[in-house]
Image (spheres, rainbow, N blue to C red):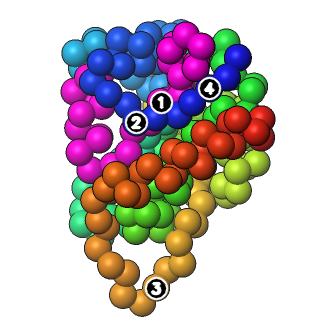
Amino acid sequence: MSYRIRTARSEDAAALAAIYAPFVTGTVVSFEFDAPSVEEFQRRIEATSTAFAYVVAEVVESGEIAGYAYYGTLRSRPAYQWAAETSIYLAPAHQGRGLGSVLVEAIERLMAAQGIALSVACITSDNAGSIAFHERLGYEHCGEFCNCAFKLGRWLSVTWMEKQLLPCTEKPAERRTLTDADIEPVLAAANERLAAGGR
């Protein structure tokens, strides 16, 4: 089985919603209570894609979507524009194949192309697999919110992790919008890495 990474499209909404729904309804990975509808997922894809990057991994042989990753605003105040929060979800059948690291590396490179200096991940504290995954990719623990959420009958904490993508300069340029010239070489490099084994 081989994979390719491309930008997300509105018509991917049903497949992405199907990947995400079990994380909402059966786990504490997501803090949503109700799985988003296809229409809501389409809205999210379109909203994120206007300012940031939203990418999917699909199986070359079938076109099946195996997972997705995106990033967005950390907080709304303009001084936060040089930081972004990431999300990644893989269908269970496609986990453990090196696909996640390729997806995250791709969105990190796209963040850097926009001038985003800091990548942030917010992870349920007992999600040891995700924490270890981010550690392998160079993320460091930077904080924890203890017992800040309640889902599926228990109190939950979240671990915050960060990775510096660009140096903190004295006068950073304002975050810019991605162009095809930014996106295409990043996706090409990601697909080359997948073709070489993905690890």
* Residue type indicated by callout 4: Tyr
- On the image, numbered disc 2 is attached to which residue? 7
Secondary structure category for the residue under label 1: strand
Secondary structure category for the residue under label 3: loop
Mark number, residue 169? 3
Secondary structure category for the residue under label 4: strand
Along the horizontal axis of the image, is 26 left or right of 76?
right
Closest to the observer: 54 or 140? 54
Q: Taking 108 as reference, is 167 above or below it?
A: below
- On the image, numbered disc 4 is attached to which residue? 3
Closest to the observer: 55 or 116? 55
Mark number, residue 56? 1
Q: Taking 49 as reference, is 3 above or below it?
A: above
Residue at 77% across, 35% down: 197
Q: Taking 185 as reference, is 113 above or below it?
A: below
Q: Residue 94: say if magenta.
A: no
Q: Where is residue 186 in the image (x, y as percent from the top left)?
A: 51, 51
- Residue 146 visible in the displayed image: no
Foreground label between 1 and 3: 1
Residue at 47% across, 68% down: 117
- Quarter of the figure with residue 172: bottom left
Where does the C terminus fall, quadrant-wise? top right
Q: Give the range drawn in magenta.
A: 41-68
- Quarter of the figure with residue 134: top right
Mark 2 is surrounded, within 10 Å at the Cα level, by few (under 14), some (14 to 19) or many (20 or more) other residues, namely some
Foreground label between 3 and 4: 4
Q: Which of marks 1 and 3 is nearer the N terminus?
A: 1
Q: Where is residue 6 in the image (x, y as percent from the top left)?
A: 46, 34
Q: Are marks 2 and 1 in contact (CB under 8 Å)?
A: yes
Closest to the observer: 125 or 1? 1
* Residue type indicated by callout 2: Thr
* Residue type indicated by callout 1: Val
